[in-house]
Every structure is written in structure tokens, then in C-alpha cells.
Image (cartoon, coloured by chain):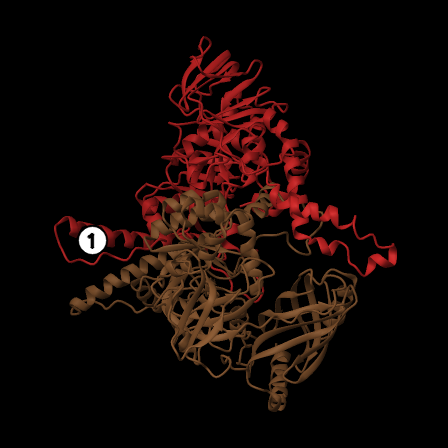
């Protein structure tokens, strides 16, 4: 969850974004899906097998069908001429809080019963802004107010589609954990309210352990029941279902990924020990700002690290963060991604990835992987996305420059082969949208303001001699026009 | 807090002193010598169940419609009403409201003497936060609710009434808006289990404090209810040797209501919420309906595909009052405000069964006006009438006894002098369970209003308890009629009647004080920016002033008010 001081540090950035990209958005209608699309004559950064100059990508039914220099467009294909442009796999944001109507169920220390999927908001304009930054998929996380937070899910940014069309099909489900200051909430206590438990890092550990002990017992009750049923026993009362414990049982069974918010090395090592004790794996540590101190331990445990490029010192537990974190962990064999945790940051994740080239000297490809293939692996969706390879989903971002350059601006973003963001079209549509807004505002204003109200009869005669006929005519006409004039 | 308690004592004392002045709330008697049998002769009859009949007769006997038609025989004992020029409609139904349950008094401060403790915070679903599904519109219905008369004067004979507040506020009942005792009102109960998704507060307010927690909580409650039914049956079969299942009042009440086929009413207004509601009702495997529904124009076909009934909130979205004039609404918001009234027409076209409810509308005449906007946006007047009558009855399973003018049905009728949705039409007579009520015309202002009272007003006055403040949220019509609500430390109530005539205003609320439902009238002068006048309650008269928060006057008032010991 975003820290306010961090948000403040981003203020200049936010300002610039809104100055330069004033998207005026309506409820979008999803794009048509052409059966075949050819992106031609582009520099294709495949991430998996190098760069193809003057390359083309053929998309059939939303999947990448061919990649190379001599790909021909079949009859009837939609052709996107990308001469001088760069194509990369769509950016994947491993830590996002967009597209949801609620983020935290902050009332309890274990809120595993809640799920982000139920509060998805497909109308959140951040989806569109992220698309304009080349993002095609995002891991939607619960906040970090509780030791064990809510269930998470990966979505594709299918702007204009209903909530049911956002989830990334087949992506493994996840759950948010949180360590450190946020879940202990000792900085957030309200005078007069009972103190929250846990209030220390020790308490956070105990909270998680107690929850898993409970989940283990719950699992046993169900396992025993299922065994008895399988053995043919009849007339059994099934155990009561507990929505808080079910997802934790899935974690124990390896069916649900743990994404743990953390900063300090001690708390990270704590969770690794605790996970070992209960026999589950942490899939990713999120933020993991002191990860560079324990990179070997992270690599040995086989967990992913999803960090910020260069945010630090926004609170005491973030004092030891350094911009070399991503590169140092990578060099020690940790699978690293760079995430946003923020709707604005998400619009330039390409630049965030590029910073690891300056700080730590990662290669161009290694840097690009931080926002494409690596998060795809961390989220268990790398069979479908993350590189430009035949058979994968056609989730692509097209830039006017090398995407790791500060001058790179997204021209088009495709998901499943459909263009969900088109810069040219966006610019062209702005005037139309403004016009509709203005017309609607006028219409609604005249409908709400009753005609008689506009000319209080008491005042008029004092100011001017009364002119009874001309005055009512325009107002009546206006009022009459309102109901009929639907666009 | 101490001070407040002292003030409360003082106020109670004052009320005792003044109580000799109190006249009990007026009883709602039908007029005249209580004839049991009526015949409306030569009227246009709109039975809703069939086409309109010109110059027909409707016979009502002992609460039941006994004959309808051109040649209906008029019994000799019938009081004959000349229906020439009149139209007879079935009584209108407000399909979701708390009219019938008097506005509750504000919760009293803690009795313990110490500081008032915050209510016990729920630590999870097991504490059953904000759940009172055992409450019932049928049990809490009370003829002292002033709105019963107001609603009836507006042509409403029937309401689907449920308690308000919480995630499982209670059960809905079909009530007729008249009777000698509260029990006479109940037509059927329970017919609905309304849900609300409103959280009590932000962080630190106990479980659940977000939509996330609310939904997970409701899932768990349904699972627990289902399990407790099974566990109870399992135990009853052979109690020996097994621990007995725990009794839980929430589960027990819900299990019973579900067995009675009560509809689970799910709130949803915009398209995201509507699609979510469709999904939830499917997942819960309950008989469900949606209330709200104003963005139904976007999802009508999906609702139709699931055959879900819909209760449409007639309080159409409009621009918020007293907001930053520079704030620009989004295109989506503007489109919503523009298109919301087209929802009923879209629903009708898609084949969704829908009824209307008053939502936040405080004056019944505005309910019909709001429906007229739906008609203007393409809904046929017949369909609008059906949404107010037979469709509502069908949705709640009482179409066998009311909702249309048919032989044998409950005699709920509205008699008008013209088309129901025409603004100039007057409601003449209303029959509820065969009792006749002449509709009162709301008092009209004599002079055109000087200025506009629309907006939020902070009212300051000194009660026997000390300095106090209330907030009046007023809406003024072009003719000066005032509607809206008033939030005071003693509770919130809708304005029953009110107007601004010239610079003189008056409006009345009815609120439950210690001695029961009481009229409180605010009257005085409006100088264009502020209100000044007196509050008349229980024979007392208190001076008050009113300003719009944010204005220069209100800043001054706040400084003054602080001395009065307000938090």
C-alpha cells in the first residue's frame, strides 16, 4: 500500500503527467477483435531471443502466429505500419492497486476471506492510463494493513470490458501478506480506540503462525471428512466451511501464491523460516527494499523479488533502500521484477526498468525483463505472456523510441491482438469528448434549473421595464429542446 | 459527555413540565360515517390487469373489490360516488421503503455515567456485525408514522417496508397504509431480505470496514445459515453422542425467511454493481432481486437473461448541491445523469420485470414526477403504471390479492381527475382496504417565493439541553414548495410539508421524542442569505438561525457555537 510520504515525493511527476497527457475519457467500448493483424517493419524486442530489426509480427485470433523479417500479411489482415517504432511484450505490473473499489479490509489482522476479484472496477480510468504506459497485465493486490491480507488476482487491462472479462484466464490465485510497520499499525492507532494487535514485528509473526496453525487443523478436519466419504461412510455432516481458512489451506497445498509486502531483511528471513515450518513457499517478496542484503538467502529459497527502482527513505523502515537493489539481487541469482504500487508510476515502468542499467549496470535485455518476462514468471503466467514468441498472447506495446529511453512514448497497446490504446486516436477523440461533455452539462443544467427560476418576477420590474413576450420564448425553447435532444 | 448527560436530564424535566400541553398524535380515521360499501359509478377504470374501461363501475365491499365493469350491479347499501370525469387506478405501491416505521429517536448516550464507550467492535464474521435480520417491517409498522398519511395522499396505498440500517437490516413486509391497529396494515410478511453494502466507517471501525469485508461477510453468513439448517436437522435425527449445534439468531432468522421464499434484495445502481449483483445472486443460489438499478440502461439484457426482478430507485441522479462550482463531473457521470431516467424504458424493452420505489424522495408527488421523467424518456404510461402496481405485487408474491382492479382483490384504489402522470392531475380519493380517504392537498404558498432555499442549511438554536445544531437539506420547487430532510441530534426525519411564500418560510418534520412521534415546525423569514425564525415543538417555541455552511455567516456562527460546548 502506498505510503503518503511516498506519494508526496511523486508529486512533480504526477503533475507532469497530467499536463502532458490529458486523457478525457468516456466509458470506453472494447475494441473490435480482427481475426488477423500484422505489425510490420518494426524493431522487435522479443526479450526471449534478441532483437529483430525491420521485423514483423503476425497475430491470429489474438495469439502471436509468426515473428520475423519476412512475415506476409494474409488477405484481410489489419496492417499496423510500425516503421521506425519498437515493439515489446506488454508490460506486466507485479504490484498494483488500480481497478478496484476497495483496497484494504483493515479491521482484522487476518483478512484472507476477502478477495480483490469481487471489487474489481473496470471503469477505473487508471486502467486506461496504464495502457497508455504500455502495461497490459497487473497483479491486483490487497493493501498492507494486515499480516495476512486479502486474495489477489492478475488481470489483463481490457479497458471497456466488464469486470468478469478482466481476470487473466488461468493465472494462479494469490494472497497478500504484509510484514513490518504497516500490519503492526503502531503508527496508526487512534486515541480512544482499543490498541490493535499485532503491535510489533513479533506480533506479526505470531499472527501469521496462529492463522496457519488454525488452517492446518481445518485442513485436517476436511481431509478426514473426505477420507470417510471416500471410504463409503454415509450419513456424515460435512464440516462447516470457513472462508478465512480456505485460502490458507490453498497456500499450504501450494495452490495459491503468497505475495508478501516487506522492507527489512529481518522480517523477510522471519517469513522464510515460518514458511519452511509450515511447508509452503513464498512466491514473491514485494518491495523487499533490503533484499540486496540477503540476496543469497532469497536465491536459495527460490522466491521472487519485486521491488521499486529508486524509492527510499520515505519512512524509517525504508532508510536502507538503494537504487542498486534490483541489479544486486539479479547478479546473485534472484528473479527480480520492478513494480509500481501506484497508478502514476505504472505509466512509466519502462523508465523504472531502465534505471537498473544506470544503477548496477544491467544489460538492456535484463532491464527489459524486469517489467516483462520476470513478473510473468513470478505471477505464473509466463507460458502466455512476457516475451514475443509464437503461440503467446498478442499483448504488445509499440513505442516511438527504444522503450528504455526517456523519450519513448507508447503509440499503441494491444491485448489479445486488439488495440486497447492508440495514441493518435486518443488525441483525435479529445475534442469530440469535450464537445459531448459540454453539451450534456448544458442540457442537464437547463433541465435542473426550472425556467421560472431564472427570472424572479420581483426583481425584474425594479431593474427594467417588463418585456413579457421575448423573455419566455428562449427559455421555453431551451426547456423543450432538452428532452428531445438526446445525442 | 458529562455535560450532555446533564443536559439530557434537564431536557427530560422540561418535557415533563410541558407534557400537559401535548396532544397525542392524530389518529388516522377514515372520513364520514364509515360506510362499508362504495360504488364508484361512471368512471374510467384502469384495472392494469386488462385494458381501461370507460364509464365503468367499481364496487367495494368490506375491504374487497366485489364488482368491476360497465354493468356492475350496485348493491343497495352502497354509497355511490359519481365517477364522471374521474379515473380509478389500483392503489400505488412503493416497492421499497421504510415508510410505515416511524423515524427512530437518536440513540441515547450511555447510561453508565462515564464516557460513552464505543460500541463493541466486531472482530470478524463470527461477531455478526451490523446484522439484525430478525427485525421486521411487519413488527415495527406503526400507524403513528406521519409519512403514512403523506404517502396515501400521494396515491400510495401499499408499501414494501423494511427496517433500515446495517448489512442485514431486517425483513421486508407488504403493508397497506391504513388500519385501526398496526397489525391491520400487514398484508404479507416476510417478503424480502434486504441487504446493504454500506460500511459503518473507515479504518479502525471494526469488521467489516470495506466493500471487500462486507461481501466476504455476507458469503460467510449464507454458508453458515445453510450449514446450521443441515446441522440442526442432523442433530435432531439423533442427538445422542454429538455436540449440539450452536444457536445463532442471525442464522435462525435468515433460515426462516428463506423458507418463506423471501426475496434477497441486493443493492446495485451502476453497471459495475449491477453485474456484480447478478453474479452474487447466482452464486448464493437465492431467489433474488436488485434494488437501485439506475444504470440499468447499460445492462438490461444481462438482467433479463437471468430473469431477475428489479426495483428501480426513482430518485434520479442529479448534480450535487453546494459543491465546488469549479469541479467538473466526468463524462461518465454526465451521461449517467442524462440517461438514468431512460432505464425503465430499456428494462421494459428487454423484458425485465420491474417496480418503482421512492428511494430518497421525500414528497410523494415527486415520486410521480420522477416516474413522468421515465415516461418522457420512452417508457409507456401503461408500463409505468404497471411498475407502480401489478409488477410490484408480482415481484413480492402478492399479485393474488392486490396490484390490480379485479373482483376479489383487496380494495386499494386511487381516484384521480385525470391521467396519473400529468402534473395538473389531482388525486381525489384513496381507498385502502376499502376505507375511504379524501386526499388532502398539501398547503400551497400564497405568494411566489423570494429566492431559493435549496441546499444544506446549518440551523442553530438553544434547547433546554443547551446549544444545539441541526442540518436541514432542503429542496425548493419553483412554486416555493419545500421538501427534504433534517438531521438533528435527536435523529433524522423527512420534511412532511413546507413552503416559502414571499420571504416567509415554514416546514414541518415529525420525529420520535420521548413522548412519541411529534411534529416540529420551523418557520420564519428568509432574507436571501440566512434564515431566522422559531421552532415550535410540544408547545415550546425556540428561536433559531440558519446559514449555509461555508458562507461568512456560518463562520461566525461556528465561533459562537463553540462556546455552547459542541465537540
Among the chains pictured, the one given red colouring is A
Chain in brown (letter): B
Depth order, front residue of A453/B135: A453
Which residue is nearer to you in this view: B253 or A406? Answer: B253
Residue at (41% x, 74% y) in the render: B139
Asked whether, in this view, residue B227 is left or right of residue B51, the answer is left
Give percent across and percent down for residue A387: 44, 23
Inspect this view and state whether residue A437 appears.
yes
Q: Residue furthest left?
A: A232
Write down the residue under mark 1. A225
Q: For mark 1, does the 10 Å Cα neighbourhood hold few (<14), some (14 to 19), or many (20 or more) residues?
A: some
Residue B66 lies, in percent from the top left, at: 36, 70
Which residue is at the far top?
A70
Q: Where is residue B128 in the image (x, y as percent from the top left)?
A: 40, 64
Residue B239 vs residue A349, the one in the foreground: B239
Q: Reply above or below: A37 against A328.
A: above
Element type at marker 1?
Answer: helix
Dividing the picture into quarters, in which one does residue B478 lie? bottom right
Q: Residue A280, image x and y in percent?
A: 34, 43
Taking A101 as reference, is A209 left or right? Answer: left
Q: In this view, does A227 lie above or below B535?
A: above
Quadrant containing the C terminus of chain B is: bottom right
In which image quadrant can residue A234 be found?
bottom left
On the question of residue A177 being in view, the answer is no
Please count the marks in the image.
1
Amino acid at each position: 500500500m502506498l505510503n503518503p510520504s511516498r506519494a508526496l515525493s511523486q508529486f512533480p511527476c504526477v503533475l507532469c503527467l497530467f499536463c502532458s497527457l490529458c486523457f478525457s475519457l468516456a466509458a470506453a467500448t472494447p475494441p473490435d477483435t480482427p481475426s488477423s493483424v500484422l505489425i510490420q517493419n518494426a524493431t522487435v524486442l522479443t526479450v526471449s531471443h534478441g532483437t529483430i530489426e525491420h521485423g514483423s509480427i503476425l497475430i491470429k485470433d489474438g495469439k502471436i502466429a509468426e515473428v520475423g523479417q519476412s512475415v506476409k500479411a494474409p488477405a484481410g489482415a489489419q496492417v499496423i505500419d510500425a516503421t521506425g517504432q519498437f515493439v515489446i511484450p506488454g508490460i506486466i505490473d507485479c504490484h498494483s492497486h488500480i481497478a478496484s473499489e476497495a483496497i484494504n479490509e483493515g479491521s482484522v489482522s487476518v483478512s484472507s476471506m476477502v478477495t480483490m476479484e469481487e471489487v474489481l472496477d473496470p471503469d477505473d480510468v487508471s486502467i486506461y492510463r496504464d495502457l497508455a504506459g504500455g502495461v497490459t497485465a497487473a497483479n491486483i493486490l490487497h493493501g498492507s494493513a494486515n499480516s495476512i491480507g486479502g486474495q489477489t488476482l492478475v488481470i489483463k487491462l481490457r479497458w471497456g470490458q466488464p469486470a468478469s472479462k478482466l481476470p487473466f484466464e488461468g493465472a494462479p490465485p494469490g494472497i497478500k501478506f504484509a510484514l513490518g510497520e504497516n500490519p503492526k499499525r503502531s503508527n496508526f492507532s487512534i486515541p480512544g480506540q482499543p490498541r490493535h494487535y499485532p503491535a510489533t514485528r513479533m506480533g506479526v509473526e505470531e499472527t501469521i503462525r496462529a492463522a496457519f496453525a488454525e488452517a492446518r487443523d481445518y485442513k485436517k478436519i476436511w481431509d478426514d471428512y473426505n477420507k470417510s466419504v471416500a471410504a463409503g461412510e454415509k450419513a456424515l455432516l460435512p464440516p462447516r466451511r470457513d472462508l478465512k481458512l480456505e485460502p490458507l489451506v490453498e497456500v499450504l497445498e501450494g495452490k495459491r501464491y503468497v505475495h508478501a509486502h516487506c522492507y527489512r531483511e529481518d522480517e523477510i528471513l522471519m517469513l522464510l523460516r515460518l514458511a519452511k515450518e509450515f511447508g509452503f513457499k513464498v512466491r514473491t517478496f514485494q518491495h523487499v527494499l533490503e533484499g540486496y542484503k540477503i540476496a543469497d538467502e532469497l536465491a536459495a529459497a527460490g522466491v521472487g523479488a519485486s521491488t521499486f527502482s529508486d524509492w527510499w527513505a520515505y519512512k524509517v523502515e525504508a532508510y536502507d533502500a538503494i537504487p542498486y537493489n534490483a541489479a544486486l539481487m539479479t547478479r546473485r541469482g534472484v528473479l527480480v521484477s520492478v513494480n509500481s504500487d501506484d497508478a502514476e508510476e505504472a505509466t512509466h515502468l519502462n523508465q523504472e526498468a531502465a534505471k537498473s542499467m544506470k544503477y548496477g549496470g544491467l544489460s538492456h535485455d535484463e532491464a527489459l525483463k524486469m517489467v516483462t518476462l520476470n513478473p510473468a514468471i513470478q505471477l505464473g503466467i509466463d507460458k502466455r505472456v512476457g516475451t514475443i514468441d509464437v503461440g503467446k498472447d498478442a499483448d504488445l506495446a509499440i513505442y516511438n523510441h527504444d522503450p528504455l529511453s526517456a523519450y519513448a512514448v507508447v503509440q499503441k497497446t494491444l491485448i489479445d491482438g486488439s488495440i486497447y490504446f492508440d495514441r493518435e486516436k486518443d488525441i483525435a477523440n479529445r475534442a469530440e469528448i469535450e464537445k459531448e461533455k459540454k453539451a450534456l452539462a448544458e442540457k442537464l443544467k437547463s433541465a435542473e434549473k426550472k425556467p421560472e427560476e431564472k427570472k424572479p418576477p420581483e426583481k425584474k420590474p425594479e431593474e427594467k421595464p417588463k418585456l413579457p413576450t421575448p423573455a419566455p420564448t428562449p427559455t421555453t425553447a431551451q426547456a423543450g429542446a432538452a428532452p428531445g435532444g438526446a445525442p | 459527555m458529562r455535560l450532555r448527560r446533564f443536559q439530557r436530564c434537564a431536557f427530560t424535566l422540561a418535557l415533563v413540565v410541558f407534557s400537559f400541553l401535548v396532544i397525542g398524535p392524530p389518529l388516522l380515521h377514515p372520513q364520514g360515517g364509515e360506510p362499508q360499501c362504495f360504488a364508484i359509478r361512471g368512471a374510467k377504470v384502469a384495472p392494469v390487469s386488462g385494458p381501461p374501461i370507460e364509464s365503468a363501475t367499481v364496487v367495494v365491499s368490506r375491504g374487497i373489490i366485489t364488482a368491476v365493469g360497465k354493468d356492475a350491479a350496485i348493491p343497495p347499501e352502497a354509497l355511490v360516488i359519481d365517477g364522471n370525469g374521474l379515473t380509478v387506478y389500483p392503489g400505488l405501491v412503493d416497492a421499497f421503503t421504510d415508510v410505515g416505521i416511524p423515524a427512530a429517536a437518536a440513540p441515547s448516550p450511555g447510561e453508565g455515567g462515564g464516557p460513552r464507550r464505543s460500541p463493541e467492535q466486531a472482530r470478524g464474521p463470527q461477531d455478526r456485525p451490523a446484522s439484525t435480520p430478525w427485525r421486521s417491517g411487519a413488527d415495527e409498522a406503526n400507524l403513528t408514522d406521519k409519512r403514512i398519511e403523506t404517502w396515501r395522499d400521494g396515491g400510495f396505498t401499499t408499501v414494501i417496508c423494511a427496517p433500515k440500517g446495517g448489512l442485514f437490516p431486517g425483513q421486508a413486509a407488504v403493508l397497506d397504509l391504513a388500519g385501526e391497529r398496526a397489525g391491520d396494515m400487514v398484508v404479507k410478511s416476510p417478503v424480502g431480505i434486504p441487504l446493504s453494502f454500506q460500511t459503518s466507517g473507515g479504518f479502525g471501525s471494526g469488521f467489516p470496514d470495506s466493500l471487500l469485508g462486507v461481501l466476504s461477510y455476507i458469503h460467510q453468513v449464507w454458508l453458515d445459515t445453510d450449514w446450521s439448517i443441515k446441522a440442526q436437522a442432523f442433530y435432531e435425527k439423533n442427538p445422542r453422542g454429538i455436540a449440539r449445534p450452536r444457536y445463532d439468531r442471525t442464522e435462525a432468522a435468515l433460515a426462516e425467511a428463506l423458507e418463506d421464499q423471501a426475496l434477497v434484495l441486493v443493492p446495485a445502481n451502476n453497471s459495475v454493481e449491477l453485474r456484480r449483483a447478478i453474479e452474487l445472486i447466482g452464486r448464493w443460489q437465492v431467489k433474488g432481486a436488485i434494488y437501485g438499478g439506475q444504470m440499468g440502461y447499460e445492462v438490461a439484457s444481462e438482467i433479463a437473461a437471468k430473469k431477475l426482478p428489479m426495483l428501480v430507485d426513482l430518485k434520479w441522479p442529479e448534480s450535487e448541491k453546494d459543491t465546488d462550482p469549479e469541479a467538473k463531473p466526468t463524462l461518465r457521470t454526465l451521461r449517467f445523469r442524462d440517461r438514468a431516467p431512460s432505464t425503465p424504458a430499456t428494462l421494459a424493452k428487454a423484458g425485465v420485470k420491474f417496480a418503482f420505489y421512492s428511494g430518497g424522495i421525500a414528497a410523494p408527488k415527486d415520486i410521480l414526477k420522477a416516474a413522468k421523467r421515465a415516461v418522457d424518456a420512452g417508457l409507456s404510461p401503461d408500463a409505468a403504471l404497471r411498475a407502480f402496481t401489478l409488477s410490484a405485487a408480482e415481484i413480492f408474491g402478492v399479485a393474488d390479492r392486490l396490484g390490480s382492479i379485479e373482483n376479489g382483490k383487496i380494495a386499494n384504489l386511487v381516484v384521480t381527475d385525470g391521467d396519473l402522470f400529468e402534473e395538473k392531475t389531482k388525486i381525489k380519493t384513496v381507498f385502502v382496504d376499502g376505507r375511504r380517504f379524501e386526499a388532502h392537498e398539501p398547503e400551497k404558498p400564497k405568494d411566489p417565493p423570494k429566492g431559493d432555499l435549496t441546499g444544506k442549511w446549518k440551523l442553530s438554536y438553544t434547547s433546554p439541553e443547551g446549544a444545539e445544531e441541526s442540518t436541514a437539506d432542503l429542496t425548493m420547487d419553483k412554486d416555493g414548495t419545500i421538501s427534504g430532510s433534517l438531521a438533528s441530534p435527536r435523529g433524522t426525519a423527512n420534511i412532511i410539508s413546507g413552503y416559502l411564500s414571499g420571504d416567509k418560510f415554514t416546514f414541518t418534520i415529525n420525529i420520535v421524542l420521548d413522548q412519541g412521534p411529534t411534529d416540529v415546525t420551523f418557520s420564519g423569514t428568509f432574507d436571501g442569505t440566512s434564515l431566522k425564525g422559531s421552532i415550535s415543538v410540544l408547545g415550546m417555541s425556540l428561536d433559531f438561525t440558519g446559514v449555509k455552511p461555508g458562507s461568512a455567516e456560518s463562520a461566525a456562527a461556528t465561533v459562537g457555537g463553540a462556546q455552547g460546548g459542541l465537540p
